[in-house]
Amino acid sequence: MKRGIIICGILLFIPLFSFSFNLRIDTPKIKLKVKGGETITGSIKVENPSSEKIEVKIYLEDFLYTSPYDGAKQFFAPGTTEFSCSSWINFSPQEIVLPPFGKRRVNYSIKIPSEIEGGRYAVLFFETSLGEIEEEREGANIVILGRIGTLFFLEAKDSIKRADLENLKVEEGTIKGDFVNRSNVVIVSRGNFYIMDERGMVLDRGKIQDIYTFPNDKVPISIKPSKDLPSGRYTLISTFDLEEGDVLVKEIDFLKDSLGDIRILQVRD
């Protein structure tokens, strides 16, 4: 019987089969502060650490962060998202063959338009075949592809990061709100909090989840004060490190009553 070939993208788990991804790059992320009209060049080293020849296809795509905004990404055709810089990037070659334990550099050139505001982003993928699965029911072989990418973050030198914590409320003893990216660049936030009583004693502290956002993204966050806090008035100070020296701080005064219920009294920057 004649069999066909089905191409399948990256799979994180394939029952009964195991594939080894043997491809490395030396630059998983390129983050640059840029100005209009300049041209930037560089290269990425691609390495085959295996004893088998590897054929590599290289191409650009756009990406956005997606729910739960913990770094998870969704990928799109190049030039199709609002914050794409795919059209600014040229690279060569587009295909390479790496001999066993071989290395090769892929050169790139970035041409920044004469005017730029905020940030623009893309990913350069390096893709190779991991192997094939024989699928009896479909009468075809399934080719499994794996890929690794270099993320490009190009941001205007005068970009300013702005974020806010909005829609604060209490639900089931937990303080909830929305972290909102109010700037025109990507913001990665790493947050923490501590709770002080009226004497300034710290009685509770903890971590807020890491958040990855594009402009205008809104991400729900939650902070659960310790059940061991006695009734009284407290101040919760939340700090979000936005990287590169930028910080968002919110102070939340709240009251815990004798029944254990929490009520927000005041919010300050």
Image (cartoon, helix red, strand yellow):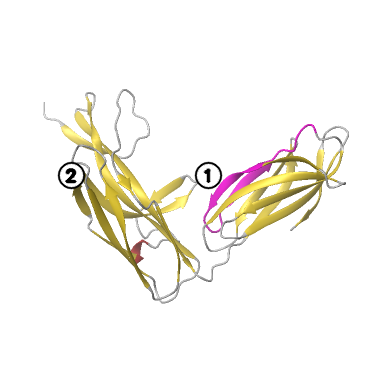
Q: Which of the marked residues, 2 or 1, is nearer the chain's N terminus?
A: 1
Q: Within the magenta stretch, is there residue 119?
A: no
Q: Which mark is residue 34?
A: none
| Position of 244 relative to 189 (above/below) | below
Instruction: Give residue 11's position: percent from left, percent from top.
Output: 34, 35
Secondary structure beneath label 1: loop
Residue 175, image x and y in percent?
72, 42
The C terminus: image quadrant? bottom right
Q: Are marks 2 and 1 in contact (CB under 8 Å)?
A: no
Do we see residue 168 in this rendering?
yes
- x and y percent of residue 250 in the render? 72, 54
The residue where tag 1 is placed is 70
Kind of residue at badge 1: Asp
- The residue positioned 34% from the left and 28% from the top of the image is 14
- Report the quarter where the N terminus lies: top left
Q: In the picture provided, is 269 more to the left or to the right than 104?
A: right
* Residue in the foreground of this view, choosing between 91 and 137: 91
The residue lying at 11 percent from left, 29 percent from top is 2
- Viewer can see residue 143: no
Q: Is residue 233 left or right of residue 74?
A: right
Q: Amino acid at mark 2?
A: Pro
Q: Give the magenta range.
A: 207-228
Q: Which residue is mark 2?
A: 99
Report, in whole angstroms, how far the alpha carbon at label 2 lies from the one at label 1: 36 Å
Residue at x-position 74% and y-position 49%: 237
The quadrant in which residue 124 appears is: bottom left
Query: For this view, does 159 lie left or right of residue 235?
Result: left
Q: Kindly indicate the quadrant of the structure image that contains residue 16.
A: top left
Sort mark 2 into few (<14), some (14-19) or many (20+) by Cα contacts within 10 Å: some
- Label 2 residue SS: loop
Q: Position of residue 126 (x, y in %)?
A: 29, 49
